[in-house]
Amino acid sequence: MWCGRLARCRGSVSLPVERGRDARTTVWAPEGDEEMATATLTSVSDLSKDEILRYSRHLIMPEVGMDGQLKLKNAKVLCIGAGGLGSPLLLYLGAAGVGRLGIVDFDVVDFTNLQRQVIHGTADVGRSKLESAQATIREINPNVEVVGYNARLTSENALELFRDFDIIVDGTDNFPTRYLVNDACVLLGKPNVYGSIFRFEGQASVFYARQGPCYRCLYPEPPPPGLVPSCAEGGVLGVLPGIVGCLQAMETIKLIIGQGQTLIGRLLVFDALGMKFRELKLRKNPDCPVCGAHPTITRLIDYEQFCGIRGEEHTSEMSGIPEIEPREVKRLIDEKQPFVLIDVREPHEFQICRIPGSTLIPLGEIPKRMHELDSASEIVVHCRSGQRSARAVEFLMKAGFQKIHNLKGGILAWSDQVDPSVPKY
Ligand code: ZN
């Protein structure tokens, strides 16, 4: 029977501890873990008449019932991010009657979010995601206490923020935050309901170091920076975070009501194109640096540095890639100055928008097609935001091209500064 920190609620009464695992219930309080194993009555012990009506489809199921619904009402769940995964998660956890929902997000809703972040609407564009999510949850279920933290999750604030919640749900899309969430959960002994998405593939698991592996047991090292593109770079089908976020919501509710087999020790991998779920058994790594027998990480570290992100920025600054401003390129065009404009995006991006006169050579084809370029000409290279083209310029400079520049800010900046009729994506 799980109650976690509810044991600390005022007026709580300790009940006999139920240990072990029975056939029907996943008990996730390990032997000898008094804090997690202490089942209690909580400060809220009743549902109102309105709540009984609202949750009636839960209450008539023996697996939930009054007991389970009260556990939901007394549960405190913190969701990191109110984006693609956070949207379905928060909607369903709110609708299900989780008593306190915390949200950490510092972002603002933009138009590109609306294709998947269904907790926000068109009228919310420009509004903080926190405010928008809070308003939607209140509309769905005014019984839920929504606590917003308008901040970036950092090593300085994570432990403090997590401390007041029973379960942390990771709805982030970047590696530094993912390792930070994992380590903070391991250090505090809290379950981390994990989900991730990319294009047509999703993953979900529950990392709970007291009963199974943690994220570092699965992925001890982050991938090299830039190897795994973000949703902004690689795209994502809008329904996918809906499905994975719902899996996370389901796991969270199972943990709270203590029913079913959770994803502790299992990684669920979802292939949307093939419409297949696969399951990988996960083992705890006895040498895991954070949850192993002899941990080397005993407090939160610098996760940007750990994931090599600052290192990468440093390199790009140091390598001195020559840049050219969009307005300067416009001047060259207007004055009919001779130069070559190369677009290193992919063909499907070229179909969305293009700068007139540009030649498409996708980044991956640059090595085999660089003979098409004359190193004596002035060359400007661009992509969407300026990152891929910086890599192309770097490559071409190493190959001997000297009169070459990267279009600063890519076609996005071109749209902002030169030609607003070019659509942004
Ligand atoms: Zn571990």
Image (cartoon, rainbow, N blue to C red):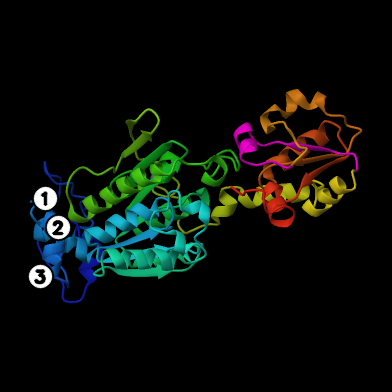
Which contiguous range is marked in magenta?
A: 337-355
| 306 over 396 or under it: above or below | below
- The verdict on residue 343 being magenta is yes
Task: Return the residue at label 1.
Answer: 63
- Which of 360/1 is in front? 360
The structure residue drawn at horizontal position 45% and vertical position 47%, both measured from the top left corner, is: 289
Mark drawn on residue 68: 2
Residue type highlighted by circle 1: Glu
Residue type highlighted by circle 2: Gly
Q: Say if residue 37 shows up in the picture.
A: yes
Where does residue 317 sit, x and y in percent of width and height? 75, 51
Mark drawn on residue 347: none
The structure residue drawn at horizontal position 22% and vertical position 72%, both measured from the top left corner, is: 9
Where does residue 283 sit, x and y in percent of width and height? 34, 37
Q: Earlier in the sequence, mark 2 or mark 1?
A: 1
The structure residue drawn at horizontal position 89% and vertical position 43%, both measured from the top left corner, is: 336
| Farthest residue, direction bottom | 10
- The verdict on residue 15 being magenta is no
Q: Secondary structure at mark 2?
A: helix
Q: Earlier in the sequence, mark 3 or mark 1?
A: 3
Cα distance between the residues tagged 2 and 1: 7 Å
Q: Is residue 123 left or right of residue 366?
A: left
Would you identify the image quadrant in which residue 185 lies? bottom left
Residue type highlighted by circle 3: Lys
- Which of 370/280 is in front? 370
User: Contact (CB < 8 A) between labels 2 and 1?
Assistant: yes
